[in-house]
Image (tube, rainbow, N blue to C red):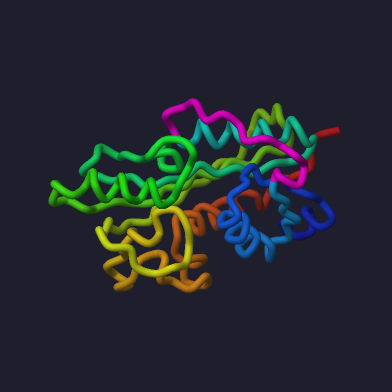
Amino acid sequence: MNIASKTAGGTVVLASNNAGKVREFNALLGPAGFDLRPQSEFNVPEADEPFMTFVENALTKARHASRLTGLPALADDSGVCVNALGGAPGVLSARYAGEPKSDAGNNRKLVADLAPLADRSAYYYCVLVFVRHAEDPQPVIADGRWDGEIVAEPRGDGGFGYDPHFWLPQLGKTAAQLSAEEKNRDSHRAQALRALVAKLGPVSISAPR
């Protein structure tokens, strides 16, 4: 069954307040029929993310948003993983430099940590979790990976997070230099979203009555 026919008129809460993520999700999932709303519209506070894996954190965020809104929910947990740093920042990407969260501070710390190291290879990783209701026993899970390397000097003013330092050798650009169309075609989040839509094909988004 076509996913658009099942989502028409139905709202899915996005378990994020990140404006950049909201734009990307709507650009990618809007055509599939999702009426996707950020959790801030429902006054949902950010969930704790205590786990050391992306999938556990994403599931926690999805259940939290669904529980507080009574709606199906979609959550992601994503970050940049640097091979020479043992996969760091990883799940701590948003708070790598501590609180309060700061893209500029995170990027400064990452560049400084990599300064004495030769290997700059890295990848963005994203896990998406969709739940029909807070206690859904069969969450739908998809992931995506985008390989690149970290450069010391920022390039480009698009995107968010680590994008100005995430160099894509095959494209000769950083993620921050890509157009929205290019990023929505190639990124870790785009890959995960395409996989999620494919998995949701036979899944009803409605909570059981």
Dividing the picture into quarters, in which one does residue 166 lie? bottom left
Q: Which stretch is magenta?
A: 39-53
- Magenta highlight on residue 52: yes
Residue 22 lies, in percent from the top left, at 62, 55
How many labels sit on residues?
A: 0
Residue 191 horizontal/vertical position (percent)? 48, 57
Foreground residue among 82 and 197: 82
Main SS of the magenta segment? loop
Task: Left or right? Give the position of 136 relative to 155.
Answer: right
In the rendered view, does 54 fall on the left or right side of 117? right
Q: Nearer the viewer, residue 124 or 140?
A: 124
Q: Residue at x 38, y 47 (%)?
A: 105
Horizontal and vertical percent position of residue 176? 42, 66
Q: Quadrant of the C terminus?
A: top right
Q: Is residue 52 above or below residue 103?
A: above
Residue 1 at x, y = what percent? 73, 56
Residue drawn at (27%, 57%) of the image: 149
Q: Is residue 182 above or below residue 122?
A: below
Nearest the viewer among 103 and 173 is: 103
129 left or right, relative to 90: right
**Residue appearing at x 62%, y 64% in the figure:** 27
Residue 171 counted in the magenta span: no
